[in-house]
Structures are given as C-alpha cells and as structure tokens.
Amino acid sequence: MLRRSIPRGGWSRWTPRLLTSPRIFCLSLIVLLGQVGLLQGHPQCLDYRPPFQPLQHLEFCSDYESFGCCDQRKDHRIAARYWDIMEYFDLKGHELCGGYIKDILCQECSPYAAHLYDAENPRTPLRNLPGLCSDYCSAFHSNCHSAIALLTNDRRFQESPGKDGTRFCHLLNLPDKDYCFPNILRSDHLNRNLGTVAEDRRGCLQLCLAEVANRLRNPVAMVHAGDGTHRFFVAEQVGVVWVYLPDGSRLEQPFLDLKSLVLTTPWIGDERGFLGLAFHPRFRRNRKFYIYYSCLGKKRVEKIRISEMKVSLADPNKADPKSERVILEIEEPASNHNGGQLLFGLDGYMYIFTGDGGQAGDPFGKFGNAQNKSSLLGKVLRIDVNGAGSGGKRYRVPMDNPFVSEPGAHPAIYAYGIRNMWRCAVDRGDPITHQGRGRMFCGDVGENRFEEVDIIVKGGNYGWRAKEGFECYDKKLCQNASLDDILPIYAYGHAVGKSVTGGYVYRGCESPNLNGLYIFGDFMSGRLMALQEDRKTKKWKKQDICLGSTESCAFPGLISTHSKFIISFGEDEAGELYFLATSYPSAYAPHGSIYKFVDPSRFWHLHSLGPVPGESQKQLYLQLSGFSVSPPDCFQNSGTAFIHLESTSRQMQVQTSAGENQE
Ligand SMILES: *[C@@H]1O[C@H](CO)[C@@H](O)[C@H](O)[C@H]1NC(C)=O
Ligand SMILES: *[C@@H]1O[C@H](CO)[C@@H](O)[C@H](O)[C@H]1NC(C)=O
Ligand SMILES: [Ca+2]
Ligand SMILES: [Ca+2]
C-alpha cells in the first residue's frame, strides 16, 4: 500500500505544539488547590484559547469551519502535511486511509483539541496523536497501520509497528469514553452548548459573578480611559471618582472630588448627582475627560452641566481640579429625569443623553420636551468637543447633524423622543467580523407600563411622549401620521421590572460564548437579561440570566448573588463586562458593589486543568486574578488573550502575548 519508505523520526516538526509568541510577558497567578466536581464538557484549543469561528473558509478541515481551533493558515498547514503523507500511498492506500488520516490530522482543529491531545493535564506529556475511540482506532489500525509511523514519531508507537492494534489503541485511549474522536462529535450533551452560553431548562443563561469592588456610594459609572493602563474609574453619585488599578486595588485618594458642586441628597431614588463620565478618544495625548452632573445655578435654578476637565500633569491618577471648563448647561424643570450618559461614538463626536426634564408624562410645553426640537431635553445631542462654535460656544456642531437646517430645531440634536435614557454604550463589534461595530444601545426608562431598549440612529424619533415602548402613551400625538418613530428593539412590562438600566454588548475575550449578547438589567427588580439578535429576521430575542444555578459558581472567587438595585453597567479596557449595584440606593449609603460577569463554562475551561493523577478529588485550579488583556481580537494568532501554560508540578506560569496597548 505504501509506495515509498518512511523517513525515521522525520515528523517532529508536525507535532502539535503550544504556540509561543516572541512578545511575551508574564502574569503572576494564584494557584489554588481545591475540591471540585467532575470535569464537564470544555471546548478548548491546543494553545488554551477558546475555540472560535474562523474568519475565512477552511478548505481542508471544513468540518471545523463553523466553530473550532483552526484559522485558514493552520488549515493550509494541515492540508500540506496531509499531502506530504499521502505521497507515500498508492491509489488503494488513498482510498483506504485518506479519510482516516485527514480526520486524525484535523483533530488539531477540533474545539476539543486540548482534551484530545491531553494538553489539559500537566502531569502527562502532550500527545502527538489525538485520543481515538476504540472502535474507530481498531478500524484505523487494521486498515492503515503502516500510516502510523507517518503520523507520529512517538517511540512507543514506533516500537510496536506490528499488528498489535490493541496495544496501539490502548495508548491512544482517553479515560473519558465520551472524549475521544469521533464520539466527541456525536455527544449531544457536550456539543449542545458549543459556542453558546449554557442554558437551564427554562432557557435561562447560566452565568456567575465575581465581586471586584464594594463599599461604594451609589456607583453610577465605571469607565476606562482607553489609554492602555487598564485602570478603571468608578464614579459615585455624590460626585467622587475613584481609580481602580488592574490588580483590583483602589487608590486611596480619589481621582476627582466634586462633592461641593454636585447637587444630590440622601433621599432614596434622588436622580440628581454626578451622573456621567467619558474619556476623550485621544485622552492619552490630550488628558481630557468629560463629566455630567446636577448642580444649582443662580437663583437656585437646578441644572445639568457638562464640563471638560484634564488629568493633572503631575499625577495621572488625579484630575486637575482647576481644569474644569463648562461646555454646556441645561436647566432642569424638575428633579427627576436628568439623563446622564456621556459617550464618544466611533466618529469621535461626543453624545449626550438628556432626560425629558422630569415630573410625569413629559408635561412641559404644548407636547412635551422630548418631541420639541427646540428643547435640549429628551434628546441625544451630538457635539464636536474639539472645536469652538459661534457665539462663544465651547463646542462645534457637526455639519451633518440631522436637524442643522430645520428652522427652530437645535442643531446639536442627533435623536429625539427620549424619556430618560439611563446607560448607553457603543458596541465594539464582533472581534473577527466587526459586525455590529459602532451601534449605540440605550435603555430608555418608561413611565408606568414599559421599559425599553433602543438602538440610536441619526435623526431618529424614539417616540416619547407619543409612545411608551411599543404602545401609545399620548393618543393624539401617537396617531399623528408624521410621528415616524423608531420602535425599541425590545420592551418589557412592569411585571418584569420598573426601571431599565442599559448595558453593553459583550465583546470581551474571557467569555467568548457571550460574544454579541446585549446584557442589561432592571434597577427596581434587580433582573439581569440578555438580548440576542436573529440576524435574518433582525428581531431581538430576550433571555433571562440566572446566577448560580450551576455548580461552577461554587469556585473560589465566584459568587451567585448580588445586591438588588442595578445602577449601571461597565466595561474594562479588555472588554470584560461588569455591573454596578447597591442594596440601599441612597447617594450617601456605602452599599454599592461592582460585579464582573463570568461565563462558568468558559471560566472552567480557561482556568482549570484536568484531574491530576493520584489526586482524583483535586484539581489544580488556576485563577487568573487580575488577568486582563488588550482588546480587540482574542482569536487571531496576533491576538492577546492567548495563554501559554508551562507546568512544573504545581508551579505554573501563565504567559500571554503582549498586545499593542500593553506597555
Ligand atoms: C419648545 O421648547 C422651547 C424651548 O424650551 C419652548 O420655548 C417652546 O415653547 C416649546 N414649544 C412648544 C410647542 O411647546
Ligand atoms: C402632527 O405633527 C406635526 C409635526 O409635529 C404637526 O405639525 C401637526 O400639527 C400634527 N398634527 C396633528 C393633527 O396633531
Ligand atoms: Ca430633571
Ligand atoms: Ca421609545
């Protein structure tokens, strides 16, 4: 069957190897030894990265095209190796063994590659053949045993070249019967959740939390500066902003203390205070950031103020208290509905989300503020902070703002018909395809029936007070044919929650199963929810998020409960997702915490190692504490969430390739 003789030991260059990167730095880790349950299904690539959907078509290992561990380059390499091996076969050999050899070589692309090659167990060497199920292995051996020497240079296989299939297949055996090729592909319970978050029977997504900060006074915002420092900034409603370092510690001195200027009270539910914070897209160069807060003007008029500030030249963790430059002030006719979100779009412009002014039913003027394009209330405003406008304005109106040439309309308006958008975020887009990039999601708090989630588009009318959610609120305005409003992507009734808190589309590295899910919550009910888009129908489907219903949340450092009142969401520089909640929503009560979302199945995969022989009840358990990686692509070879494990008994070192932002 073979038409050429086989070179001896010539295949080592093909042995699956852990990739190493030239630019490597080390992260310290805590290695904990704990009692944990049985190993569950855990897709993981040979380099311990999560499996992914390849960007380009795979010509050879096409079975792993929709989800696996190979990109096109690796696929080409495997194909080349296949053709090298097939050189040794005649036509009959091709027919008989081609399929087996292809299947075996392609196991490097399997989403379970780490397991199939025994890469997860630090006590055993990496295999250079994948674990094969015994039936399959026997059939392969009896038909193609001469191919073995071409596939591996492992001495143990070389020394038993004869007809001893039993011994060969015993060597390739994996302890878990499900976990061998090809059974692993047929195992429903393993593959059901491949590439998705685990769900319980009711379809509720199973997530865990890690508390990363506490004792905060109504934390309203958590933002990063996008400057590669991986610090995050947490703003309290009273007007104090704290810096947290990547290791989770908080600096003793606040970054900013505006308590004396910020208007708020300890009353539960007071919506005034320090409400928003955003860093300039070129913060690293210009040290500028922007704040949004309630304050008292002359004659005790209540206002919201949007200001620019700079970070101190002497201390990058301190704002320069003398640098405040007011950009915009808007009078507030009532103490509620003050908006508060500030963010920068991909266009570099600053977006400001104001509330309708307050009271109930947007009562101001003929048809309320939100539908009145002369008023800045109930709007999304878009301004250019990098220039001065006419008449002493400290911002410029972008020329392509939608209403610049509409008589009577304020040119800064970008979208209208908004009641009180509370928490908006820009989607970073899919890390590979960039699908969704730049979309702006907001939660718009409802009156007394519906809470809604919207995607903001230029010139959009979001309906309020004509509509609340999908339904009419003001019948007369609602029936006006010229309303031309944009409906929410999702709305829910007050049986579910009474005050939406907008979240983020998850685009981080550590929980790739969450990629593309918009995760948000409700302040009053404390519910966490997720929306997933059906790309064909363009409809968004809601799924609830359940905490702690899997055993995995019992890991050290993970929790499954949180304080009830969900105030805000946040993202760190690497794109990991957090939310901010308190058990007592008073601006002065230090009962607020920050929680990080952890997909337990992913956490388990990325952070755990297989059972250690002789210590069957124990597993080495790695907690990548403080582990953070640069954005944007976790999945490419140049990517940054790329972990290389080296083990010497219990001492482990995790190395990850440095990203562009890591300095
Ligand atoms: C619209 O708002 C402007 C500015 O607040 C106000 O002067 C005007 O009366 C309002 N128009 C209507 C029709 O209510
Ligand atoms: C409908 O809305 C337009 C624009 O807001 C307004 O000019 C018009 O008077 C409204 N029509 C009715 C019947 O209310
Ligand atoms: Ca108000
Ligand atoms: Ca609406």
Image: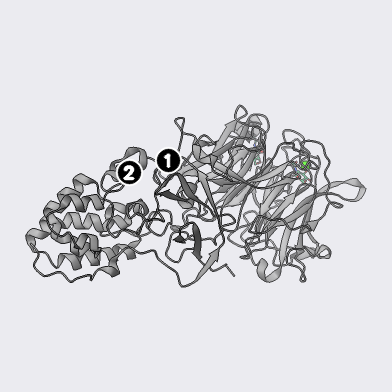
124 and 69: which is toward the camera: 124
Q: In the image as oriented, which residue stretches furthest toward the top?
A: 495
Q: In the image as oriented, which residue stretches furthest toward the front?
A: 614
Displayed quadrant of residue 461: top right
Q: Amino acid at mark 1?
A: Leu
The answer to whether one can see residue 465 in this image is: no
> In the image, what residue occupies the spot 55% across and 53% down?
427
Q: Amino acid at mark 2?
A: Asp
On the image, numbered disc 2 is attached to which residue? 176
Q: Quarter of the image for the C terminus: give it.
A: bottom right
Within 10 angstroms of label 1, few (less than 14), some, or many (20 or more) residues? few
487 and 187: which is toward the camera: 187
- Checking the image for residue 38, the label placed there is 1
> In the image, what residue occupies the spot 30% across and 48% down?
174
Secondary structure, mark 1, is loop
- In percent of width and height, residue 165 lies at 16, 51
Please say if 416 is above or below 561: below
N-terminal label among 2 and 1 = 1
Displayed quadrant of residue 105: bottom left
428 with respect to 64 (left or right): right
